Image (tube, rainbow, N blue to C red):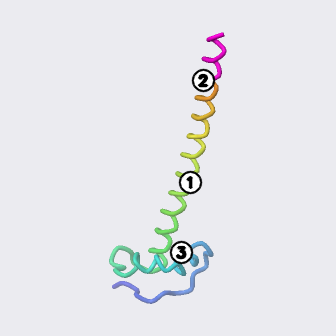
Amino acid sequence: NHDSTPGSIDNPSIAAVIDNPSFIVLVTNPAFEATWGEAARCATEMLEQSQVGGQNAAGLNKGLGQDAAGLNKAADLNKG
């Protein structure tokens, strides 16, 4: 039996996810999660993981760009 009414949420990030209109799409069919709180927790974890993944990718791209710039500079120096 699934709880279909939102309860009080103690975690501010989870509360923010629930307040976001796009979250309604995730909980229209709460059969996947036992409670609204669990659904919110799962959504928050996914968001946090995607943000961390994006930051890691940005850091990696920055490092690769710096390496490429260094290689290009070395190649230019070797020409002379």
Q: Is residue 68 above or below residue 21?
A: above
Q: How many marks?
A: 3
Where does the image place residue 31, in percent across and percent down from the top left?
Answer: 33, 78
Q: Residue at x 46, y 76 (%)?
A: 22
Q: CA distance from mark 1 to mark 3?
A: 17 Å
Q: Are marks 3 and 2 in contact (CB under 8 Å)?
A: no
The 10 Å Cα crowd at callout 2, few under 14, some 14 to 19, many 20 or more, is few
Q: Is residue 76 above or below residue 42?
A: above
Where does the image place residue 46, in percent across and percent down from the top left?
Answer: 48, 62
Q: Residue at x 63, y 18 (%)?
A: 76
Q: Nearer the viewer, residue 10 or 17?
A: 17
Instruction: Residue 75: say if magenta.
Output: yes
**Left or right: 4 as drawn, with respect to 11:** left
Where does the image place residue 64, in percent across and percent down from the top left?
Answer: 57, 34
Amino acid bearing label 3: Val
Q: Which mark is residue 72?
A: 2
Rendering quarter of residue 36? bottom left
Q: Residue furthest front?
A: 80
For marks 3 and 2, the one nearer the N-term is 3
Where does the image place residue 51, in percent across and percent down from the top left?
Answer: 55, 57
Q: Which residues are magenta?
A: 71-80
Q: Are marks 1 and 3 in contact (CB under 8 Å)?
A: no
- Quick one: SS at disc 1? helix
